[in-house]
Every structure is written in structure tokens, then in C-alpha cells.
Image: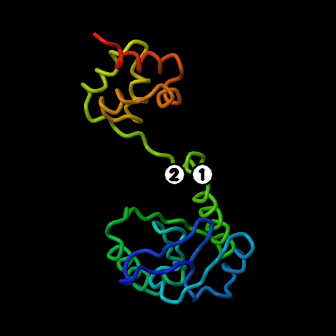
Amino acid sequence: MAGKPADGRGPVHVPFGHIVANEKWRGSQLAQEMQGKIKLVFEADLTPVDFYLSSRSCILYVTEADLVAGNGYRKRLVRVRNKFTVLDLGMVLLPVASQTEASCLLVQLVQEQAKEPSKNPFLRKKRPLISELSLLRTVQQIPGVGKTKAVLLLQKFPSIQQLSNASVPDLEPVVGPAVAQHVHGFFTQSS
């Protein structure tokens, strides 16, 4: 179900709705709180990571005792940062009062990741920046297309060639039936 890549580096594959946990958490209060709410899979060789929520996100559980004890937690953080250099290294600190609270947070994070991307506010695609202002202005010259609809069209069809080859049914979900007819007619009319 879950496993490391053959070379032993990189993140673990985690199916949607699952958490892969370090074996040291088996039988803990945190693991018991998650049972029945989420599918929990234990693996032995996950150090320095405690939990994988997906192949792109992991959790290092650092207790107050770890913080007081010394630099052990810092070494774990450094190992994670060095191990996953390809991924976004923005690390978020989420303080929790107990393992029960941590289990609720982990379940919530996994449930949000498992949602359909269009309905998950954390996974919505960011609007890509339109690299060419002249391209935007060109598309705005099409009758019935203003700035807002030009941006929508260029997000779906990033080049004039792709836009000109789009059919009316391809265009309708982006700009509606009337404007779709205008756009298609603009590119198909003979001069």
C-alpha cells in the first residue's frame, strides 16, 4: 500500500484518506484517537518523519520535552529539509496541547486533502500570471470579450493557436454560450 521508492530516498506514497505513521506511534494515544476516523498504516523506517499525510507533506511531532532536552529535534528538521530538497520547504509550526488535539488536526488535514481539488480551498489552483500583456490585449479585441473573459480564456487556452482551435463546446464552460459563439466565429470567419 505505502512504501519508499526503490532507492530509499524521497517521500512515501500515501493513498488518499490514509496516514503512514512511524512504527513508534503504534499503541500511542495519538494513534488510538485516529483509529476509526482515518486509515492508519504503520511503517518501521520512516525516521526522521513521524507521519506522512501525502507524498508531499509530512509531520514531525516535536514535544515540549524535545524542545527542552536539546538539539535532537533540530537534527530531525535538518534531515527532512536535506532529504526533500525538491519540495516546497516552507515549514509550518502548529502548536497543539495534547496528542488528542494532534490526532484531530491530522485527521482534519487528511480529510481536506482527500476532497475533490475544486472544493478544497487549500488545493485550488492559483491563477497563473499571464506572461504577455500583449496576448491579453489581443484576446480582448475579440467581440464580446473583456478583460475578465480574456483572462479566463487564456487560463484555459494559453496560446492564440489553442484558442483558435477550440470548439464552441470547449469554449462554453469558460465564457458561456453567447461569447463562445463570438470567439469561435472570430477565428473561423473567412476574410
Name the foreground residue: 62 vs 42. 42
Q: Residue at x 57, y 88 (%)?
A: 23
93 relative to 7 in the view: left or right: right
**Total numbered labels placed on residues in the image:** 2
Mark linked to residue 9: none
Residue behind mark 1: 116
Q: Residues within 10 Å of mark 2 (few under 14, many from 20)?
A: few
Name the foreground residue: 71 vs 174. 174
Residue 158, above or below 18:
above
Mark linked to residue 123: 2
191 relative to 116 in the view: left or right: left
Label 2, secondary structure: give it: loop
Q: Amino acid at mark 2?
A: Leu
Residue 111, by quadrant, is bottom right
Q: Residue at x 45, y 66 (%)?
A: 56
Name the foreground residue: 52 vs 60. 52
Residue 81 in picture, x, y percent from top left:
35, 73
**Quadrant the N terminus occupies:** bottom right
Q: Residues within 10 Å of mark 1 (few under 14, many from 20)?
A: few
Label 1, secondary structure: give it: loop
Q: From the viewer's perspective, is the residue at label 2 or at label 1 nearer?
A: 1
- Tell me the CA gap for discs 2 and 1: 9 Å
